[in-house]
Image (spheres, helix red, strand yellow):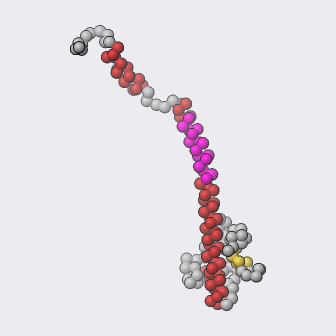
Amino acid sequence: MTCVATKGPQPYALRAPAMLTRLIRRRQAFSLMELLAVVTILGILAAIIVPRVTAGSETAKERSCVYNVGHIHSAVERYRDATGVWPSADLNELDGNLDYFPEGIPVCPVSGNAYRIDPTGERYRVIGHTDGAHTP
């Protein structure tokens, strides 16, 4: 079976690829419904992900505060053992001392306030953003 070029209309089998390429060429953009569906899906994903990320950040700050309180508490105890007296409530004695805090006393990552010690109990306790709730 040989294919002979003829003048006039071609058989349907020979025209199909040309019609298909015209259909493909004509569709060059997304429809409004497709764009609306994508924007809706992205909005739903953002509504789910954003609260989880911010909650994780707050948890990390609170854990960092617990670590800082423990570290300061340890330094206060070491200072007491070395000197025989407790440091002042604002921890000035420890701040300039390279043996305890070479980079300076950290601040609470949750509230941004400086840590202090509360001398009103039987033993000193370090107070962070929650008034000593994280004291070891």
The x and y percentages for residue 106 are 61, 73
Q: Residue at x 63, y 77 (%)?
A: 72
| Image vertical order of residue 56 relative to residue 76, above or below | above
Q: Indicate whether residue 136 is drawn in magenta.
A: no
Residue positioned most to the top: 8
Q: Nearer the viewer, residue 108 or 44?
A: 44
Q: Position of residue 94 (x, y in %)?
A: 62, 82
Question: Based on the displayed image, in which of its 4 quarters is residue 136 positioned?
Answer: bottom right
Q: For the image shown, how many numbered marks are present on the structure? A: 0
- Residue 104's image quarter? bottom right
| Side (left or right) of 31 relative to 129 | left
Residue that appears at 51% across and 30% down: 31
Q: Is residue 47 above or below residue 100?
A: above
Query: Does residue 46 appear in the picture of this structure?
Result: yes
Residue at left offset 46%, top offset 31%: 29
Given the current orientation, which residue lies at the most extreme front position?
1
Q: Is residue 58 above or below residue 113?
A: above
Q: Overall secondary structure of the magenta stretch? A: helix
Q: Is residue 19 left or right of residue 88?
A: left
What is the x, y in percent for residue 1?
A: 23, 14
Q: Which residues are magenta?
A: 36-52
User: Residue at left 77%, top 80%?
Assistant: 120
Q: Let me know if residue 44 is in the magenta part.
A: yes
Q: Quadrant of residue 68?
A: bottom right
Where is residue 99? Give x, y as percent. Answer: 56, 84
